[in-house]
Image: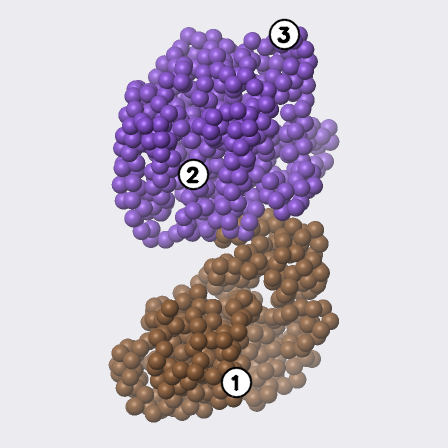
Chain colours: A brown, B purple
């Protein structure tokens, strides 16, 4: 697919790199020639130096033949205008990244008035993810598929866990819950397990299942933790605003520590239920004074990665059970995995994942299946993809035990009529079923791609 | 330095060269000649190439440094192996002479040590002119087009191999770009060959001269070059195609995409065509009296100007006998060369434009020191970095030419010979004036001079830095 990306900042570059690896043809528009050159040296893409709101530049970048235009500059207005212009120039679909929280998330306004196919609010996406993890603190990540069922939960196996050292085929008998282990991450090695594999302490494990079953599984495995009730948010950034608005509905007590007094006033005007503290959170005594020791969770959301990391480490040391740190730059992602086994979140990762899911959905739609959503597991090379079975797929109408699947694929869950079914040998897929597939193979286009040829 | 990856790519280069040797082999077999001269190097290339290509790189990280080293080493290795057929067939018994001829072929120079090329066996002759075609577009670009390579970093290799101050990818991916370039190259070559067949050339001559034109090389099957065919039609066909191969190939792509008008608006193209027309008219007027009228003056000057500015080096008459003005216009054209992104050598028209404009900008700043002057090319501002790079390139180019002249002076040849030989080699033209004029060859130079000219040719084709960096100790250090 021909894709034009405006902006070669951190976001633009990450999206371009990911899509380029998936085999799409990318051209980048960027104002700053130094940034552009850096992008061109690192990826097999073309670039145009110029302003993406100029129709000539859009034309030069090949918008007329582009299937997708992605506006990922640092300015909301630029992103909106360039999307509108790109659409006029001939781009079929447009994606805009927006940051200002006053652009309300979740409306169809952008599609209806400006013709923008998808609006992604990086901060909102991040806040959603954080709020899900806070509701389910045993997990390091929680993803929800389209109809709310099933969930995909990643968590770390503690020492002495009862589910360790048992071959997976026996595990299900022991815990008697309908869950499926999709992926095991053993210090950076990702593996889609079969019945013979065992889980070791320290592994990051991803499981799927219906929400209730998952909770029961966590309880029986001795991992369950109650949803948090006292949260400290460090930094009154846009993510904090969204996060507080999401947490408000669950009755969580939130304290936001913000350094800038003007910003703090704005926050207290906008957010009625949260306690707003105007103080420098980088000061340890401030944190103590505000009850760091009694907090269930500490979320570091300042604009500085360094501050987030250091203060996150401090909170961990002070005994806060759930610490989440936001990092802008994913260069240190691997390092952070070691420092924060619990959770470190990169908006970059979440946004790239959204964009990729949308584009996979566009490019691989056929009568065999369509892609509804997609999530990265860990390093992003392993993905969980939700397909909707079409009528033309050869996977339909036969029991799964009669089909020969490729080696690195796992049919993790089937959703029929909003209910999740754990697929077994006798399961038969029908058109309209949603199938969640875990794979390390980036080349799978549709459900038929799961089978050996 | 990612040695394993470099080894892997070099292996592919050698395999590709081995594969390309099939064509002269077929030619040799068609004419009933011995297959030995080609089979022997092929065996070498396939064995060494396969061993090197087996190396599994730890990572596919490749940066500008590796790109330069890769290109520099590839060209040296290709030439070293490419010279073997001439030696085995005993057509050129001395290895140094064979190497000179091969480097001259790959770098599309066309400077020959053969006084009578007709003595070559048909297979070797085919190889000699085919090297022009391989070298014209570059073998690493060829590999990008046919073999799966990691695209993200291959741009550093393209940048080092493709002539011109910048490489613009016409397609989003290196591979597609390489394919389009080779497709345009191939189609133009075939079209020329068809035109030449209509002019009464034999198929063998037509295809070989198309190779030599396409790579802007300049070897011919005849001692007298194109003059030997004595046909106005053939001269015109070759002139027009030399002119085309001197254009930036991106323009052809624009024309294919139906944006021909935009292609004609290209500033570099306009300056290029302006230089050609201006030189043709001045030379035609200058030589009119000696060749019997302005019209036949136009005939000779059009052929010679296109031949020299594109750094091909065919001749349709002995231009060394022309008046001084015409001769020195040709020498200046040797320096200028064709457009960036073409198969031609020389400094390249776009560099000349930027040099000239930056001089003008400097003059304006001298008048009013606080004035900010932006240098533009194709209406787009040129960054200071790039301007500085071009100034450095120009200076080094002249310095190397001068060193070349110095080494040649040891031969006792006259100054015109030495200067033009050095210029003709670094600009990849081939024939110069006086002792290296179209009627003579490079045979008589001493071995030292030949080695220095070989280096100059490689420096000229690879635009100096890839090769120069190979001899910079710091690049080999592990840091």
The percent position of residue B89, horizontal first and vertical second, equals 30, 24
Q: Which label lies toward us, 3 or 1?
A: 3
Q: Would residue B395 appear left or right of B77 to someone viewing this image?
A: right
Q: Position of residue A197 (x, y in %)?
A: 28, 77
Identify the residue at image location x=64%, y=11%.
Answer: B287
Please report contact status of discs 3 and 2: CB closer than 8 Å, yes or no: no
Name the residue located 36 percent from the left edge and 21 percent from the top edge. B120
Against B405, residue A302 (above or below) is below
Q: Quick check: A304 above or below B284?
A: below
x 55%, y 46%: residue: B169
Q: Label 1 neighbourhood size at 10 Å, few (<14), some (14-19), many (20+)?
A: few
Could you tell me residue A278's position as x and y percent? 61, 75
Q: Report which residue position mark 3 lands on.
A: B290
Chain identity of mark 3: B
Marked residue chain, label 1: A
Q: Are the residues under marks 3 and 2 on the same chain?
A: yes
- Subunit bearing disc 2: B
Q: Give the image quarter of residue B81.
A: top left
The answer to which of A156 and B93 lies nearer the viewer is B93
Secondary-structure class at tag 2: helix
| Residue identifier under label 1 | A148
- The reply to whether the C-beta atoms of the residues labelled 3 and 1 are less than 8 Å apart is no
Whether residue A3 is visible to the viewer of this picture, yes or no, is: yes
| Image depth: mark 3 or mark 2 in front | 3
As rendered, which of A14 and A309 lies closer to the eye? Answer: A14
Q: Mark 2 = which residue?
A: B139
Counting the numbered discs, the total is 3
Q: Which circle's residue, 3 or 2, is located before the other in the chain?
A: 2
């Amino acid at each position: 697919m021909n894709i034009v990306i405006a902006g070669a900042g951190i976001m633009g570059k990450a999206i371009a790199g990911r899509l380029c690896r998936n085999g799409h043809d990318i051209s980048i528009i960027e104002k700053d020639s130094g940034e552009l050159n850096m992008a061109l040296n690192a990826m097999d893409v073309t670039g145009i130096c110029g302003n993406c709101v100029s129709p000539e530049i859009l034309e030069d970048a090949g918008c007329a033949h582009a299937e997708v235009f992605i506006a990922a500059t640092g300015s909301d207005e630029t992103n909106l205008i360039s999307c509108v212009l790109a659409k006029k120039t001939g781009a079929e679909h447009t994606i805009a990244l927006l940051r200002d929280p006053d652009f309300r998330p979740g409306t169809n306004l952008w599609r209806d008035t400006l013709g923008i196919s998808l609006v992604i609010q990086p901060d909102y996406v991040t806040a959603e993810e954080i709020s899900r993890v806070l509701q389910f603190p045993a997990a390091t990540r929680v993803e929800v598929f389209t109809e709310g069922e099933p969930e995909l939960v990643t968590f770390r196996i503690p020492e002495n866990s009862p589910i360790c050292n048992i071959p997976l085929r026996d595990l299900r008998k022991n815990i008697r819950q309908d869950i499926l282990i999709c992926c095991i991450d053993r210090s950076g090695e990702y593996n889609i397990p079969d019945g013979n594999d065992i889980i070791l302490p320290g592994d990051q494990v991803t499981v799927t299942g219906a929400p209730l079953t998952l909770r029961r599984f966590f309880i029986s495995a001795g991992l369950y933790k109650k949803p948090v009730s006292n949260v400290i948010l460090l930094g009154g950034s846009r993510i904090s605003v969204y996060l507080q608005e999401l947490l408000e509905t669950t009755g969580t007590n939130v304290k936001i520590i913000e350094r800038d007094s003007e910003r703090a006033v704005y926050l207290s005007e906008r957010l009625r239920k949260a306690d707003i503290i105007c103080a420098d959170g980088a000061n340890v005594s401030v944190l103590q004074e505000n009850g760091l020791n009694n907090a269930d969770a500490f979320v570091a959301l300042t604009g500085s990665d360094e501050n987030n990391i250091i203060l996150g480490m401090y909170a961990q040391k002070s005994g806060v059970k759930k610490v989440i740190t936001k990092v802008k730059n994913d260069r240190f992602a691997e390092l952070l995995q070691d420092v924060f086994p619990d959770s470190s979140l990169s908006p970059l990762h979440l946004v790239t994942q959204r964009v990729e899911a949308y584009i996979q959905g566009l490019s691989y739609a056929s009568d065999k299946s369509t892609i509804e959503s997609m999530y990265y597991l860990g390093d992003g090379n392993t993905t969980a993809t939700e397909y909707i079975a079409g009528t033309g797929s050869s996977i339909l109408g036969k029991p799964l035990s009669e089909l020969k699947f490729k080696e690195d694929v796992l049919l993790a869950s089937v959703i029929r009529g909003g209910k999740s079914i754990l697929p077994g040998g006798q399961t038969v897929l029908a058109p309209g079923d949603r199938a969640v597939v875990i794979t390390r193979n980036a080349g799978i286009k549709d459900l038929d791609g799961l089978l050996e040829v | 330095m990612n040695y394993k990856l470099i080894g892997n790519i070099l292996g592919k280069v050698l395999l590709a060269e081995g594969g390309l040797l099939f064509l002269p082999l077929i030619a040799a077999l068609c004419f009933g000649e011995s297959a030995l001269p080609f089979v022997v190097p092929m065996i070498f290339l396939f064995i060494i190439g396969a061993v090197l290509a087996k190396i599994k790189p730890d990572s596919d990280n490749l940066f500008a440094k590796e790109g330069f080293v890769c290109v520099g080493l590839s060209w040296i290795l290709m030439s070293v192996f490419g010279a073997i057929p001439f030696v085995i067939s005993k057509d050129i018994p001395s290895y140094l002479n064979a190497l000179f001829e091969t480097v001259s072929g790959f770098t599309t120079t066309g400077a020959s040590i053969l006084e009578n090329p007709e003595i070559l066996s048909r297979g070797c002759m085919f190889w000699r002119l085919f090297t022009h075609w391989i070298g014209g577009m570059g073998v690493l670009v060829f590999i990008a087009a046919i073999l799966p390579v990691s695209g993200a970093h291959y741009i550093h290799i393209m940048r080092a191999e493709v002539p011109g101050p910048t490489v613009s990818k016409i397609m989003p991916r290196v591979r597609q770009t390489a394919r389009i370039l080779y497709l345009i190259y191939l189609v133009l070559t075939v079209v020329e060959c068809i035109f030449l067949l209509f002019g009464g050339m034999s198929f063998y001559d037509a295809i070989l001269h198309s190779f030599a034109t396409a790579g802007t090389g300049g070897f011919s099957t005849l001692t007298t070059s194109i003059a030997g065919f004595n046909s106005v039609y053939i001269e015109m066909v070759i002139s027009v195609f030399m002119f085309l191969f001197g254009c930036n190939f991106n323009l052809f792509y624009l024309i294919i995409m139906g944006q021909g008008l935009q292609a004609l608006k290209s500033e570099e193209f306009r300056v290029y065509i302006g230089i050609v027309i201006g030189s043709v008219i001045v030379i035609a007027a200058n030589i009119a009296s000696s060749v019997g009228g302005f019209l036949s003056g136009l005939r000779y000057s059009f052929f010679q100007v296109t031949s020299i500015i594109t750094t091909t080096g065919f001749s349709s008459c002995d231009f060394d006998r022309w008046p001084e003005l015409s001769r020195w216009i040709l020498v200046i054209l040797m320096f200028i060369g064709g457009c960036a992104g073409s198969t031609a050598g020389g400094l390249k028209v776009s560099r000349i434009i930027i040099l000239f404009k930056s001089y003008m900008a400097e003059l304006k700043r001298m008048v009013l020191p606080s004035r900010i002057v932006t240098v533009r090319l194709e209406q787009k501002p040129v960054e200071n970095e790039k301007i500085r790079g071009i100034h450095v390139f120009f200076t080094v180019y002249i310095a190397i030419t001068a060193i070349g002249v110095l080494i040649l002076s040891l031969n006792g040849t006259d100054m015109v010979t030495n200067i033009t030989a050095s210029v003709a080699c670094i600009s990849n033209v081939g024939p110069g004036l006086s002792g290296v004029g179209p009627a003579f060859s490079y045979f008589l130079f001493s071995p030292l001079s030949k080695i220095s000219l070989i280096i100059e040719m490689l420096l000229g084709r690879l635009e100096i830095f890839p090769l120069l960096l190979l001899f910079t100790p710091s690049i080999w250090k592990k840091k």
